Amino acid sequence: MHEIPTEIILQHTDIDSPQISACIIPSESREGSALADLRAFRHQLEDFQELPDVVNKAGELMRLGGYGTNTNGPSFADDVLRIEYRGRCGMQLTIVDLPGLISVEGEDQIEDDIQVVKDLVESYIRNPRTIILAVIQAGNDISNQKIIRWSRRVDPSGQRTVGIITKPDLINEGAEKRIALLARNEDTIKLKLGFFLLKNPSPSELANGITFEQRQAKESSFFKSSPWKEQRLREDHVGALALRAHLQQIRIWRRTCEDGSSNMLSHQIFHACNTA
């Protein structure tokens, strides 16, 4: 697994043609020519279909293994790829997607990688303006999930942590009841802002260019079919559309609490996940 920390900054403007740009924010450890090369990385994108190529070029410049012509190199870097979108998106928001937390060294991860990811995660979740999306796979035991423990440490009141349960299609038959209990926030581990249950597209669906509308239809059909339709799931906590609406509500509520003004504040949503 080789991943690049990525910030996606959404800026609402009334321009007719959206503007998408990419740059790299070098880590504090960079110096010399490596620092200069990373700072010089600038790309204008016509649309998001160009993003995979930009990510590959960024990974190569960060000297990560598996990107571009790099056959060897670290799995992670603490440089950040920043994508800025200016257009009619209806919000001012920063979404941060970081690598999953690593418990033990593996074939592609060494001890230095584990520390890099740990430092990155902690640097973001300590920020009191960050809304933490604690992503866990349905097949994993939630009591062993690091991100839940870490979020409770920095957000003991639970005012900015949302649980996201993914891959319900990959669990063992008969485990639906246990997952539904967690999704309804009725398990032994509870979050003040609750859990959301999502069914994301498969790799083949993504490769075939599944549209947003098709994704929503497939997700809705999945949870309306057995055995999920018998699990008394909360409709307002199932699916990507429900999650998006909930995050908008949280953002508006936090904006009101922070300054009571009508100004649009830029909140940071951190997407954190666990790996085995």
Image (cartoon, grey):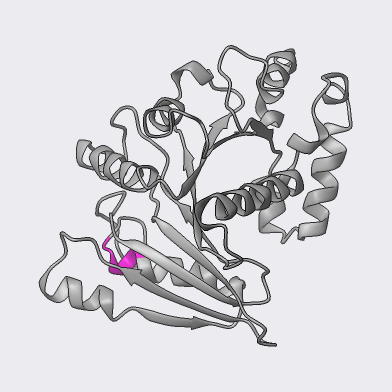
Q: Is residue 209 above or below residue 234?
A: below
Q: Nearer the viewer, residue 169 or 182?
A: 182
Among the 4 quarters of the image, the one containing residue 73: bottom left
The N terminus lies in which quarter of the figure? Answer: top left
Instruction: Tell me the residue at 10%/73% (across/down).
Output: 32
Q: Nearer the viewer, residue 80 or 91?
A: 91
Q: Nearer the viewer, residue 151 or 18?
A: 151
Q: Nearer the viewer, residue 241 or 153?
A: 153
Q: Position of residue 59 (x, y in %)?
A: 35, 63
Q: Position of residue 186 (x, y in %)?
A: 67, 16
Report the residue that reaches farthest toward the bottom.
Answer: 16
Q: Kindly tell me whether residue 172 is visible in this rendering.
A: no
Q: Position of residue 132 (x, y in %)?
A: 49, 42
Residue 60 part of the magenta-drawn span: yes
Count the numbered circles shown: 0
Among the 4 quarters of the image, the one containing residue 174: top right
- Using residue 59 as the reference point, say whether residue 185 is left or right of it: right
Instruction: Tell me the residue at 62%/26% (across/down).
Output: 138
Q: Which residues are magenta?
A: 59-63
Q: Kindly tell me whether residue 131 is visible in this rendering.
A: yes
Q: Is residue 195 above or below residue 64?
A: above
- Using residue 41 as the reference point, say whether residue 245 is left or right of it: right
The C terminus lies in which quarter of the figure? Answer: top left
Q: Position of residue 30 (x, y in %)?
A: 16, 64
Report the residue that reaches farthest toward the left.
Answer: 32
Residue 86 part of the magenta-drawn span: no
Report the residue that reaches farthest toward the front.
Answer: 260
- Using residue 271 as the reference point, say whether residue 239 is left or right of it: right
- Using residue 272 as the reference point, say whether residue 59 is left or right of it: left
Q: Main secondary structure of the magenta part?
A: helix
Instruction: Tell me the residue at 38%/36% (across/down).
Output: 101
Instruction: Tell me the residue at 31%/50% (across/down).
Output: 76
